[in-house]
Image (spheres, rainbow, N blue to C red):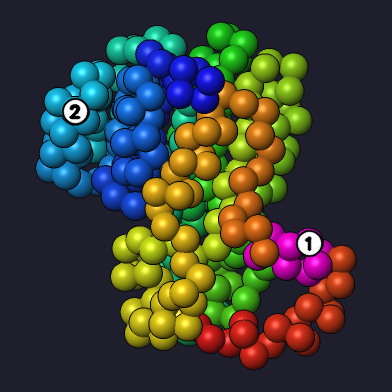
Amino acid sequence: MAAENLKNKNIIITGASGGIGLSVAQQCAARGANLVLLARRLERLEEIKQDLQEQFNIKVHIYQLDVSKTEEIKQVFSKIIAKLGRIDVLLNNAGYGIFRYAHETAIDEVKGMFSVNVVGLMACTSMVLPVMKQQRCGHIINIASMAGKIATPKSSVYSATKHAVLGYSNSLRLELADDQVFVTTVNPGPIATNFFDIADEQGTYVKSVQRYMLQPEFVAKKITDAMLTKTREINLPRWMNAGSIFFALFPNLFEKAGKKAFNKK
């Protein structure tokens, strides 16, 4: 059933050149969806397009996009909407983080993370909302993070961006309830992708959590299975989500008990 509900649907994915975005694209293609793939690396998108079209015989459209540039978002999404007309799913996957103490984080780095993780996500969403509201169906899926629920040292800015994504998504879900447009947040723990090439330059955090890391294909399957369903959140792994619930109920105790673990970045 999950495989059938995506056949011939139009799915837009930002940050589609690697990691979760690429894995979701591959799984959607296998289920017969038509794809719009967005990323900064156009050459890489060309390779992915050719591979997916040859392997699955689907339509794949690609556009170069830097989601930190709102004018570029307007231009690209206007082209997509004019070309396709109907938009079934938007996966806001583009994002990055830098693990650094607050007093060591440059303001330009703060602006950079917010412009991609928050403003870019909102700008992409705002472009498809009129279409989905008119259709009276659609699905917005926002990649947030467990960091948006459990803040830790050296992730103050990154956690703040993901906390903003959660707040935006929760409000958006209420606004769109009568339009039959679903909103889902995805809150994963650490995933084995190139995210940490930027986020963890020293490699210390990766070494400390390597055995707990999620595989992008596993996360992608959870996301793809949830498409066009009323799934509120996808929280992975389950034990980490249990920690976020405990943190919400007993924040002081949680921070004291987890101090040593939190300082592994």
Residue 98 location (% of width, % of height) = 43, 71
Q: Which mark is residue 55?
A: 2
21 falls in the magenta region: no
Check disc 1 and report its element: helix, strand or loop. helix
* Whether residue 178 can be seen here: yes
- Please state which amino acid type lies under the numbered disc 2: Gln
Q: Which mark is residue 245?
A: 1
Query: How many dots with numbers?
Result: 2
Q: Main secondary structure of the magenta part?
A: helix
242 falls in the magenta region: yes
Q: Is residue 107 shown above or below 52? A: below
Residue ID at (47%, 61%): 214
Q: Estimate the spatial distance between the alpha carbons at disc 1 and disc 2, rounded to whole Å.
A: 42 Å
Q: Which mark is residue 170?
A: none
Q: Is residue 79 shown above or below 97? A: above
Residue 9 location (% of width, % of height) = 42, 16
- Where are the magenta residues, as a range? 240-248
Quarter of the image for residue 137 reads top right
Check disc 2 and report its element: helix, strand or loop. helix
Residue 92 location (% of width, % of height) = 47, 40
- Please state which amino acid type lies under the numbered disc 1: Ile
Residue 87 location (% of width, % of height) = 45, 18
Q: Is residue 228 left or right of residue 19?
A: right
Q: Residues within 10 Å of mark 2 (few under 14, many from 20)?
A: few
Q: Residues within 10 Å of mark 1 (few under 14, many from 20)?
A: few
In this rendering, the label closer to the viewer, 1 or 2: 2
Quarter of the image for residue 31 reads top left
